[in-house]
Image (cartoon, rainbow, N blue to C red):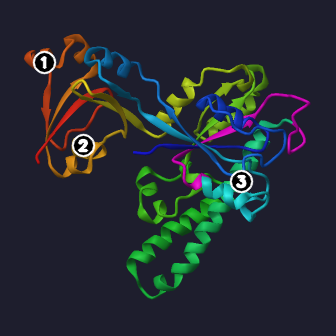
């Protein structure tokens, strides 16, 4: 599965600096809005000591870590939902992401202008989130207007969809982020999922500054939004492993591992609760269709055995069927026909 995180925020808050740190790639950073017109996209490997230890056993020719795509999206401004700045383009790019990292400026630096005139982290968060809410409101109203006639004509499925959409419209009119108020079941409902609401995406807030720069009030505010956050002074080249872990956490991901003899060892990111047959299909679509069984061992037990053959002799490798729920840290060999 492709995992993508959109990096958003107001102009000049540190988004491109974060991107540079994550990817070690040079990007265009300048002290004015809209430097980043097209999103910079980069693939960032997920450091995982479990994969490193597994490779010490199999010594494969190729090691492939799990990866996350990061999109560096140009700064939002007030009125982006109406096309201010390059708003519509930016909002469309956010729509493609699985989750959002909102960079919030907390540092004070006279040589770096702030588009709102001063440092106020909570205000900045509210500006960005308001633009997301207003764009979602536009989206839901368009859909409601399109299907109201069918609902009046007695189409039961459309009537049910209209009920859901009116519920969403009411939440948005209150300024609510949908991710905080809709159940997982409703978020997966096609009436909601197909519209790909911006405020239905989980957010991680990155406070750009030192601990002393981040007011307790803004931390409390983010906690009320039920969002994760980290504090990182991006000017000091911080370790951003915590951000990668938070991304996994908010997306509800686990990692399982595959070994192909001495050729390859690989980490696969997957949704928590994934079944063995679906996991096999991630590797190759034919594997799901022709699935027979899965040989499974926890990575720590494999290290203890030191070899796959030894683990087999000890009876530590379990044979599982297509309904087996893959666990974080499983090492799996999928058996398939054909």
Identified at 29% across, 42% down, the residue is: 283
Q: Nearer the viewer, residue 272 or 60?
A: 60
Please say whether residue 111 is one of the residues in the magenta stretch: yes
Disc 3 or 1, which lies upstream in sequence? Answer: 3
Compared with 256, 161 (above or below) is: below
Q: Is residue 126 above or below residue 67?
A: below
Q: What number is the disc on residue 130?
A: 3
Q: Is 95 located above or below residue 153 in the figure?
A: above
Q: Secondary structure at mark 1?
A: helix
Measured from the top left, where is residue 234 in percent x and y?
71, 26
The answer to whether the residue labelled 3 contacts the one labelled 1, judged by CB atoms less than 8 Å apart, is no
Magenta region: 94-118
Q: Residues within 10 Å of mark 2 (few under 14, many from 20)?
A: many
**Crowdedness of circle 1 by 10 Å Cα count: few (<14), some, many (20+)?**
few
Q: Main secondary structure of the magenta part?
A: loop
- Residue 304 is left or right of residue 64, and the answer is left
Residue at left 71%, top 53%?
Answer: 130
Give the residue pinned by disc 1.
309
For disc 2, the marked residue is 280
> Which tag is nearer the camera, tag 3 or tag 1?
1
């Amino acid at each position: 599965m492709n995992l993508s995180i959109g990096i958003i925020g107001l102009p000049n808050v540190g988004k491109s600096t974060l991107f540079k740190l994550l990817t070690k790639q040079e990007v265009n950073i300048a002290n004015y809005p809209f430097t980043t017109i097209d999103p910079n996209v980069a693939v960032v490997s997920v450091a995982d000591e479990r994969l490193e230890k597994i490779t010490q056993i199999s010594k494969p020719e190729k090691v492939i870590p799990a990866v996350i795509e990061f999109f560096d999206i140009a700064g939002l401004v007030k009125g982006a939902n109406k096309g201010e700045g390059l708003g519509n383009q930016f909002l469309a790019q956010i729509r493609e992401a699985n989750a959002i990292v909102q960079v919030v400026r907390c540092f004070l630096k006279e040589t770096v202008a702030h588009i709102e005139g001063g440092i106020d982290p909570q205000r900045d968060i509210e500006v960005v989130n308001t633009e997301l809410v207003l764009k979602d409101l536009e989206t839901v109203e368009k859909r409601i207007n399109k299907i109201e006639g069918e609902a009046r004509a007695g189409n039961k499925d459309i009537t049910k969809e209209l009920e859901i959409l009116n519920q969403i419209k009411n939440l948005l009119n209150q300024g609510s982020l949908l991710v905080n108020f809709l159940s997982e079941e409703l978020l997966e409902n096609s009436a909601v999922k197909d519209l790909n609401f911006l405020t239905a995406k989980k957010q991680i807030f990155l406070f750009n500054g030192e601990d002393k720069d981040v007011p307790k009030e803004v931390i409390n505010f983010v906690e009320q939004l039920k969002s994760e956050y980290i504090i990182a002074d991006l000017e000091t080249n911080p370790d951003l492993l915590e951000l990668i872990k938070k991304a996994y956490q908010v997306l509800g991901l686990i990692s399982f591992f595959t070994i192909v003899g001495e050729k390859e060892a690989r980490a696969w990111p997957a949704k928590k609760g994934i079944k063995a047959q679906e996991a096999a299909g991630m590797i190759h679509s034919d594997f799901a269709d022709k699935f027979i069984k899965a040989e499974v061992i926890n990575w720590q037990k494999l290290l203890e055995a030191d070899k796959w053959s030894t683990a087999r002799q000890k009876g530590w490798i379990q044979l599982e069927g297509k309904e087996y729920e893959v666990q974080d840290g499983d090492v799996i060999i999928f058996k398939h026909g054909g």
